[in-house]
Amino acid sequence: MNALYNFAVGPLAWIAFTVCIGGIIWRLWSLGRLARQRDASALAYMNWKDSLTSIIRWTLPFSTCGWRENPLLTAANFVLHIGILLAVLTLHGKAETDTTLPLCDLAADDIDALSYAGNNVEVSLLQGSDGWLLADDPSLPLDQTKVQSLVEDYANLKAQRKLEGNDLAELPAKSDTPQMTITLGAGEQTVDLTVDQLNSVADVYYVYDESGAGYTVRRSDLATLSKSPRDLYKAQTLTDKTTDDVAAMQVNDLTFTCTDGIWTLADDPDYALTQSSVRKMAGTILEMQTAWTITAPDADSAYGLDAPDVTATLSFTDGTSLTVRFGTASASDDSLCYLASSDAPTLVYEVNADHKSAFAVTKESLHDDTATAETAADTDVVAQYPVGGENDYADSLPD
């Protein structure tokens, strides 16, 4: 019986829909062809507006001559079809209510522990005094909103129906390696669920509770529940300082100073710098967000931080500073790279590797070739007297 039901709501339903839609399309095409053969000139007088008007008039009682000529038949016809529609809608609503069963009797707000394993993910979450934390990495910053939403999704997980009678006899044997195991806790109370095999025809999983009772749960309801720690991670910023707080910056062997928003080279203040490129480097450090935090890192050499690709230091107007070091590409994702921050010396971060490209500069590459007397700041002497041409700085000096 279970197999017949799964076939009826699965392939057989899709076959019926396909035949119905295909039949409608074929019927419209055949009627159009017949009209062109019998009276092609009549098609010129047909339009969408009149067609829709005709359809609407035929769906309203007594709006056409045919309906008015047979009032009893018209009334019976409309009562019959409206009754069928209401019956289908009512039965559908009841069926939805009757077949949806909660799998967890714990209130989401009472849950203080959640563990799940499967799909190459194993996570154990605990509710602490400051919010949710990862049991095996309690110092990892988690997005509390995401975690709470996940807990609510587990607490509200529902089954389509409970398997009883003949359904149990037709169930496949339980797998030695289930797809997923779930445990929810609220104080001394716990709920254990095991997600077993997939019924690909009905697109449901067989799920068992701690008593061994079996249920069917839609695959789509379980698809988004296997969140990895990275999915729950809360991105971090390196500092709360802003561009207005920056007084100087050093990038590898280049040192810059900032005065009234204008950047200059410390050892060559008259050098025309591309201001946007320098601002981009400072802004990258100030605005960068982490993609992951390694809370118990190995030695710097494991991340390429012993010989970093880039070392950059921001000095702030309050006398403090921040130094970051960019290392090699992340072992888990080559679109990320490792980064160390002087403000968190016991941690190693993973950040977008594209951030590192902002610091791929030299003194020559930072030269502003477009600087002119008209576009430069009053304090930018080199830009006021550009090198080369009739406005060459040497030629423009007063006698």
Image (tube, rainbow, N blue to C red):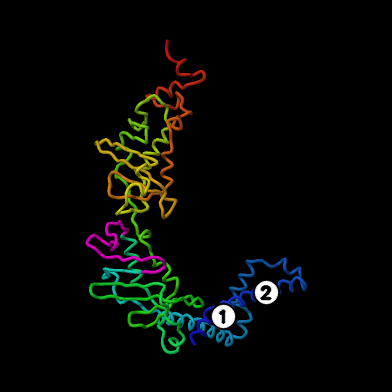
Mark 1: which secondary structure? helix
Q: Residue at x 40, y 83 (%)?
A: 162
For the residues carrying marks 1 and 2, which lies nearer the camera in this image? 1
Residue lying at the far left in this picture: please name it.
Answer: 129
Between 349 and 303, the one nearer to me in the picture:
303
Q: Is residue 139 magenta?
A: yes
Numbered circle sitting on residue 26:
2
Q: Is residue 324 left or right of residue 63?
A: left
Q: Position of residue 396 (x, y in %)?
A: 45, 16
Q: Is residue 47 magenta?
A: no
Between 170 and 68, the one nearer to me in the picture:
170
Mark 2: which secondary structure? helix
Q: Residue at x 32, y 72 (%)?
A: 183
Q: Position of residue 313 (x, y in %)?
A: 32, 38
Three-letter amino acid code at disc 2?
Trp
Q: Is residue 64 left or right of residue 317?
A: right
What segment carries the magenta color? 117-143
Mark 2: give few (<14), some (14-19) or many (20+) Cα within 10 Å: few
Q: Position of residue 265 (x, y in %)?
A: 37, 29
Tell me how many marks there are.
2
Residue lying at the far bottom in this picture: please name it.
Answer: 165
Q: Position of residue 239 (x, y in %)?
A: 30, 45
Three-letter amino acid code at disc 1?
Leu
Q: CA distance from mark 1 to mark 2?
A: 21 Å
Between 130 and 152, the one nearer to me in the picture:
130
Q: Residue at x 41, y 66 (%)?
A: 120
Say which residue label 1 marks.
Answer: 12
Q: Earlier in the sequence, mark 1 or mark 2?
A: 1
